[in-house]
Image: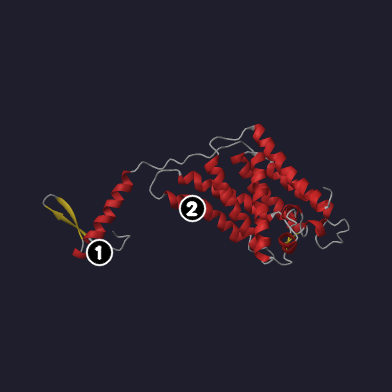
Amino acid sequence: LEAMVIPHRVVSTDVGFAVMVPPKMVAPAMAALDAQDREAAEEPVRDVEPPDHGPSFVGTGIGITLVAFFVVAGPRTGPDVQGWFRNGSAVSDAIVHNHEVWRAVTALTLHADAMHVAGNAVASLIFVSALGRWLGGGLAVLATLLAGVAGNLLTAYIYKTSHNVVGASTSTFGALGVLGGLQFIRRFRLRTVGRMRRALLGIAAALGLLAMLGMGERSDVVAHATGLGFGVLFGALLGLGLKKPVRMLGQGLALLGAVAIVAGAWLLAFHRI
């Protein structure tokens, strides 16, 4: 009653004690006390532990891959003799009007400068590694890639101009979103009062990290937000669809699929297929 600012006082009676409130506050006071009794009668929330595939090195692998691409392709401000940026950047106009959808994939492997690639390598080490522990390495890589690709495609259709996107940050925020979506489904399944509030905490945490890490002066906020949004969607779908952990064969096929998507996109970019 004190917390709800309901005036009250406790008085002694012949049979014990009574809580006195103004006549007009009797109904809200009774409702508050009844709600407190119901909540106190509930069993403590038993949080279901998420699946754990053990230590994951996929984040490290992705970070090394990004650095390797940067060593080969160089920074965006370089001469671009081999045409990596000319053929692979996610130029919105080229994606929307020329249907060069492979750019949504290839742009994830290109970076503007050394600081850009270093930041995304570290983010992959943190977010994708955490996702690998939950989903397994192959599925984590594929989900991260698809969230980034979907985010780049939506960003292109939002701008529809010469807007140019490069960098893996759309995918790294996608991995963060997948974690938030998985947490939402895991906690929402707990049949307790306030489960929606607890379920939304995972997504709120992801949004908080987006605000802290993805909205800098040089950041492409739209790409980061779309990657995170698709990540949350994919995470929720995976949380609903996966009834048991994906085993080694499935993980291998998922990883192979992710590698094939990137390799195929670059072959299309250089008109090799």
Q: Is residue 103 left or right of residue 15?
A: right
Of the pair 160 and 163, the residue shown nearer to us:
160
Q: How crowded is mark 1: few (under 14 residues within 10 Å), some or many (20 or more)?
A: few
The amino acid type found where label 2 is placed reads Leu
Q: How far apart are marks 2 and 1 (CA)?
A: 33 Å
Q: Residues within 10 Å of mark 2 (few under 14, many from 20)?
A: some
| Image spot of residue 92 (x, y percent) | 72, 62
Most distant residue in the right direction = 81
Q: In this view, does 228 lie to the left or right of 16?
A: right
**Going 71% across and 61% down the picture, which residue do you hit?**
96
**Going 31% across and 61% down the picture, which residue do you hit?**
4
| Image spot of residue 45 (x, y percent) | 41, 43
The amino acid type found where label 1 is placed reads Pro
Task: Give the SS element for disc 1.
Answer: loop
Q: Mark 1 points at which residue?
A: 7
Which disc number belongs to residue 233?
none
**Contact (Cβ within 8 Å) of mark 2 with mark 1:** no
**Going 27% across and 51% down the picture, which residue do you hit?**
34
The first of marks 2 and 1 along the sequence is: 1
Q: Name the residue under label 2.
A: 200
Q: Picture quarter containing residue 42?
A: top left
| Image spot of residue 260 (x, y percent) | 74, 43
Depth check, mark 2 against mark 1: the one in front is 2
| Image spot of residue 90 (x, y percent) | 74, 59
Task: Give the SS element for disc 2.
Answer: helix
The relative height of residue 48 versus residue 195 in the rendered view (above or below) is: above
